Image (spheres, rainbow, N blue to C red):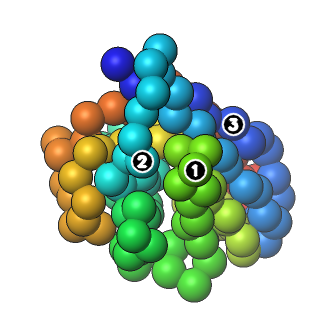
């Protein structure tokens, strides 16, 4: 069983930046996870895709965050990061880290094998 632990959420003013981190761990050795990504969910909304990165470096972003958010990975540490710049109030949500053994940037929400508990990001206007 793989556990995902997010960190880095918080309160920031519009136009500001935050960096989220997500570390994967397990009781035994784990090989590099195929794809690690981020989703977010605002109150009353469905969970929506934000960004994903494969172990090979392929990325995919939601249109709403392109040019503002950057996903990166440390494969050796099984850690994924989300650098969020030029934040907007509509970015306010709980951000979830997700991981899949599949190596593709085209995963749907049901394709992920593991999920973190989420970290709150609040952007004030």
The residue at which mark 2 appears reads as 32
> Could you classify mark 3 by the number of other residues whose Cα lies within 10 Å: few (under 14), some (14-19), or many (20 or more)?
some
Residue 41: percent from left, percent from top = 42, 43
Quarter where residue 101 is shown: top left
Find numbered disc 1 in the image and state the secondary structure of the residue it sits on.
helix
Q: Earlier in the sequence, mark 2 or mark 3?
A: 3
Q: Are marks 2 and 3 in contact (CB under 8 Å)?
A: no
Q: Nearer the viewer, residue 115 or 84?
A: 115
Q: CA distance from mark 2 to mark 1?
A: 7 Å
Specify whether 1 is left or right of 5: left
Q: Earlier in the sequence, mark 3 or mark 1?
A: 3
Residue at 58% x, 65% y is 72
Q: Which residue is mark 3?
A: 7
Q: Are marks 2 and 1 in contact (CB under 8 Å)?
A: yes
- In space, the residues marked 3 and 1 are separated at their CA atoms by 19 Å
**102 on left or right of 75:** left
Height in image: 103 above or below 32?
A: below
Disc 2 and disc 3: Cα gap in Å? 20 Å
Secondary structure of the residue carrying numbered label 2 = loop
Extreme residue in the top direction: 27
Compared with residue 88, is residue 66 higher up or lower down, i.e. above or below?
below
| Nearer the observer, 51 or 13 | 51
Category of crowding for the residue at label 1, using alpha-carbon neighbours closer than 10 angstroms: few (below 14), some (14–19), many (at least 20): few
Residue 1: give x, y in percent of width and height.
35, 19
> How many badges with numbers are in the image?
3
For residue 37, say whether it is visible.
Answer: yes
Q: Is residue 77 left or right of residue 110?
A: right
């Amino acid at each position: 069983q793989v556990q995902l632990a997010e960190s880095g959420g918080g309160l920031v003013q519009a136009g500001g930046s935050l960096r989220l981190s997500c570390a994967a761990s397990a009781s035994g050795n784990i090989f590099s996870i195929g794809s690690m990504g981020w989703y977010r969910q605002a109150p009353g909304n469905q969970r929506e895709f934000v960004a994903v990165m494969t172990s090979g470096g392929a990325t995919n972003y939601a249109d709403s965050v392109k040019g503002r958010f950057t996903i990166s990975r440390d494969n050796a540490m099984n850690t994924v990061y989300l650098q969020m710049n030029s934040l907007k109030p509509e970015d306010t949500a709980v951000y979830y880290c997700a991981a899949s053994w599949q190596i593709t940037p085209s995963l749907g929400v049901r394709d992920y094998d593991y999920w973190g508990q989420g970290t709150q990001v609040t952007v004030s206007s």
